[in-house]
Amino acid sequence: MPAHARITIAGLGPGSPGGITLGVWESLKHSPRILLRTGIHPVVEWLQQAGINFATYDYIYEEEPDFQKVYNKIATEVLSESQKGEVLYAVPGHPLVAEESVRLIIAMAEKNNTSIEILPAMSFLDSFFTTLQIDPAAGLQVVDGLRLDRKRLLVGLPAVITQVYSRLAASDIKISLLDVYPPEHQVTVVSAAGVPDREKMETIPLFELDRLSWFDHLTSIYVPALADGDKKSIPHPSVEGGDQECCYPLDQLVNIIRRLRGKDGCPWDREQDQCSLRRYLIEETYEVLEAIADGDRYKICEELGDLLLQIVFHAQIATENGDFDVNNVVAGICEKMIRRHPHVFGNIRVQDSNEVLVNWEKIKKEEKSGAPVGVLTGVPRHLPALLRAAKLQEKAAGVGFDWPDYRNTLEKVHEEFSELVDVIITADSVRIEEELGDVLFSMVNLARHLAVDPESALIGTCLKFIRRFNYVEKMAGASGRDISSFSLSELDRWWEEAKKQ
């Protein structure tokens, strides 16, 4: 690395422009290259309005599976950029308070002969202390909420828990805290401390921590010290390994739904029936798919819980009608999975997954009784068209009605598209709709031959479109004009920038 390599690390304060020091402001105005750890911070919009140009590392959060890898990659990128000339790396709050990327940059810089200058700013803790009117000099511990499993809290001292960025994170933190604090222990949740018009604060019992709905990246928790008489013994974690039986019954959730549907329960829940709940079952399913497309494991967990809620809700209504209960649902699917996997729970041998699917369909046919049914029977009419098309094609392919490979399918796509082009000229809307449907159906078939789930592919493209269009909107807003006032070529230029990012 060249001897002139230099990195200035600046703090942007807790979120209000007033939290930026004069020294940081002067550096922001005159630095040729400004890199922000994240653009998701209240002060960033103000920087844009002030004409400060910068790049952010928000894209790395989407690329890496956990925060430690995110911060390692950001630190590496900042060191790499410093080889090209002096850079200003800016982070929320104070650079040396709860900023892992800064710690990594400093450590790497020492090994690479890179000069580091720290420009301090107000920490989020300063605003936090002001909001709660507490004096940290009396004793305080600051703990990363993502590392509570590795750091034991001193319950005789008050604590500030950071990184409470979602309800799922709050739920994990609550579970850890309940090991050493009583459920009724009062904690205070604060978001955007010191930021005008955005600050929120609420004091609640610890056991209700994850019931709040407004957690975000600016949220922290204040946990007061315990009196000696309130302290709990700290259990020792088990060190036993190996496979264990699953022990997560549905009883608690079933009881909650039963109470909500009961005489003194929730009026809305009591009004629902299985028909009125259909839309929510569909919505929750698609939210799970979106979370999977995002690759956000915390969101996937949360959305699966919402979907499970719908299943238990339907089972409770059936219980009240005397039809079946959740025990029948679980027992039925368990019995079915064992029956349809004789190569796992029996003595049947299979060569590969294709043979598994053949056996699966054979067993399904044996399960059906009565008159013979058609090959396509059983594909739900209410499936979204894209999913239904894929299912119908899979069923037909199962009895040999299929192209040998993707090449013939691709030829069919070209054929159907050519027919669509021909009919567009006629302006016959009925025929155009029909031919367009044929094109879409053939594209689904091509996706199947390429081992691509068309629904997942289209969801991914929709998310990609949203990200890119959000960037176009952001750039248009930074220019001080309404997006509709720009020409298509101007908007397309930002679109291409978003694609490169």
Image (cartoon, rainbow, N blue to C red):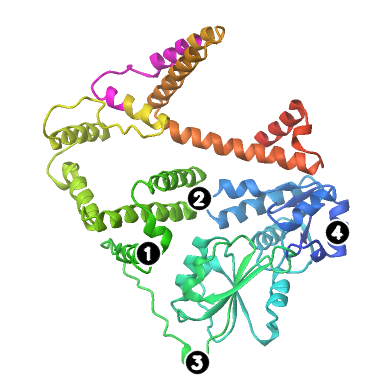
Q: Nearer the viewer, mark 4 or mark 1?
A: 1
CB contact under 8 Å: marks 2 and 3: no
Q: Nearer the viewer, mark 1 or mark 3?
A: 1
Mark 1 residue type: Leu
Disc 2 secondary structure class: loop
Bounds of the magenta segment:
394-418
Residue 13 seen by the camera: yes
Give neighbour class at mark 3: few <14, some 14-19, many 20+ (Cα, 10 Å).
few
N-term mark: 1 or 3: 3
- 114 with respect to 383 (left or right): right
Q: Which residue is drawn at 42% across and 13% down?
A: 412
Looking at this view, is 157 or 178 the one in front?
178
Q: Where residue 65 appears, x then y in whole percent?
A: 52, 51
The CA distance from mark 2 to mark 3 is 40 Å
Mark 3 residue type: Asp
On residue 16, the disc is none
The CA distance from mark 1 to mark 3 is 38 Å
> Magenta stretch mostly in which secondary structure?
helix
Q: Identify the residue position indicated by label 2 in the image.
A: 296
N-term mark: 1 or 2: 1
N-term mark: 4 or 3: 4
On the rendered image, what quadrant is the C terminus found in? top right
Q: Identify the residue position indicated by label 3 in the image.
A: 228
Q: In this view, does 451 lie above or below 323?
A: above
Q: Identify the residue position indicated by label 1 in the image.
A: 260
Q: Identify the residue position indicated by label 4 in the image.
A: 25
Disc 3 secondary structure class: helix
Q: In this view, does 166 lie above or below 428?
A: below
Q: Is residue 145 above or below residue 484?
A: below
Disc 4 secondary structure class: helix
N-term mark: 2 or 3: 3
